[in-house]
Amino acid sequence: MILKPIKYLFSCLAVICLTAATARAQSVTFYENIQPIILNNCAVCHRPGEAAPFSLITYEDVVKRSKFIRKVVSTRYMPPWKADDHYVDFANNRSLDDSEIASIVAWIDAGTPKGKGNQKAEKALLERAEAGTAYERKPDLTLRMSEPFVQQGDGKERFMVFKVPFEMAAAANVEAIEFTSNNKKIIHHANFAIHPVEDATIDLYNTVTSVNLSGDSKSDYLQWLKYKKEMTYYGGWIPGATFETYPKGMGWVMPRRGVVLLTVHYGPSAIDAESINGVNFFFKKEPIEREVKVISLGSGGIGQKDITPPFMIFANEVKSFALRVANNQPDVSLLYAWPHMHQLGKSFKAYATKADGDTIPLVRIPAWDFRWQEIYRYKKPVLLPKGAVVHIEGTYDNTAQNPMNPHDPPELVLSEGSMRSDQEMMTLILMYVERKEEDSQLTFDWE
Ligand code: HEC
């Protein structure tokens, strides 16, 4: 008796689905079918101030480039998405499925019909772009550089660190953060560290405001050591990455006073280009029951010296490295995984093994591409029990056949733990909270 209505329901659904599919092939319109795909999967990069060379938001934006779009979605060149979804399917997976590609192609082949206009969604998105955020509302606090930095048009890359002091009336609970810039096109990547400075006798202002790590002022960095005794949080941006947000009850507390040290890697530019960068903060009233923490494994982090073999890649060789780091903390639940390599990177894999021999997949990038990196968001809390061993495996191609090789001819490449892109890194950054029993039942409700 119980089965009957269910069966009936299923056959009903099948009929509806079939009708919907036929209708779609006949009348795909921009506002009904295409706009949601574009806004969800393309506009994160293709909007004003972001990394892509043009906006894809309005009907006109998309129609203007429809032939090109047909090509890049059919070949799966766009949207770029490098993680192996069969290994781990992430919440922020923005690759298009077959039916989405088919809809875009059908729509273009039908002559890009507009459908019943509805500008609401694109207006909302443009407003946020104007406010310098991709998040659902305007930031509660933006900490920006005090003056713009000019990346000279001399074709040289630069590593700059900017100090942004802050003093608030009270500490605040963080719901989301994001890197913000008025000119992301000239930026390869950016990282920011938030350092609390409670000691009022330590002045936040009487030191340099910026340091050029690739230039003469490198030693000025020492002036900031007094701020660096503690670190509350660490975040970053790479093209395509958006805000970082925390599920209900989770987050971290922005200290009342301190400095943000913002490291920006500028790509080579042919013309002088100005940028003002900063960090947007979104606060929440609800208490933080579970503090989100960040850990960095590998180059520039824990286990750097244990990478085997020692991290050197001779000219003309393809070489693999591995690192194992045991979790000495109590059981944790992972929220995000952020793998990082530079231009020689070819593939990246991270997983954990438990004492009972079980394997926990963390992230796999079968064909690494320096241009398309991502902070990967898990759908559910991933359990990393105490004693589990995290394995990181990276393969690098230092031959002339690697079109991304920064050296021509190839040269010996090391990892100094510095961020220079002609050096290499093998790093996995993980964001996590302490495990709770209920996590095994939890699905994150990301934004
Ligand atoms: C992660 C950021 C990102 C996302 C997401 C993204 N793009 Fe792009 N796109 C770029 C960048 C950066 C370029 C320019 C560099 C390049 O072509 O490699 C680009 C280039 C393009 C080009 C020009 C290609 C060429 O050969 O010049 C088209 C067309 C395009 N994107 C369409 C799309 C469409 C359609 C989507 C969504 C289905 C999308 N993009 C999603 C970043 C992105």
Image (cartoon, helix red, strand yellow):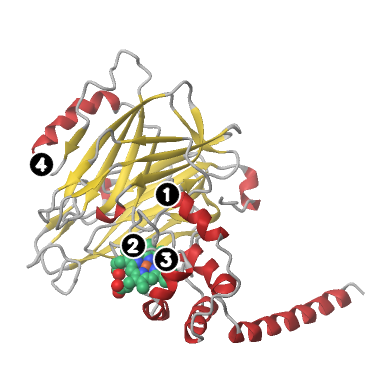
- How crowded is the residue under tag 4: few (<14 C-alpha within 10 Å), some, or many (20+)? few
| Ligand 1 neighbours mark 1 (CB distance < 8 Å) | no
Closer to the eye: label 4 or 2: 2
Label 3 to label 1: alpha-carbon separation: 15 Å
Which is more toward the observer, 275 or 117? 117
Disc 3/disc 4 C-alpha distance (Å):
38 Å
Q: Amino acid at mark 1?
A: Glu
Neighbourhood count class around disc 2 (C-alpha, 10 Å): few under 14, some 14–19, many 20 upward: some
Q: Quadrant of ligand 1?
A: bottom left
User: In whole angstroms, how far apart are the C-alphas of marks 3 and 2?
Assistant: 9 Å
Q: Which residue is mark 4?
A: 215
Q: Which residue is mark 2?
A: 52
Number of disc labels: 4
* 126 lies left or right of 118: left
Q: Amino acid at mark 2?
A: Ala
Mark 3 or 1 closer to N-term? 3
Q: Can residue 302 be seen in this snapshot?
A: no
Which structural element holds mark 3? loop
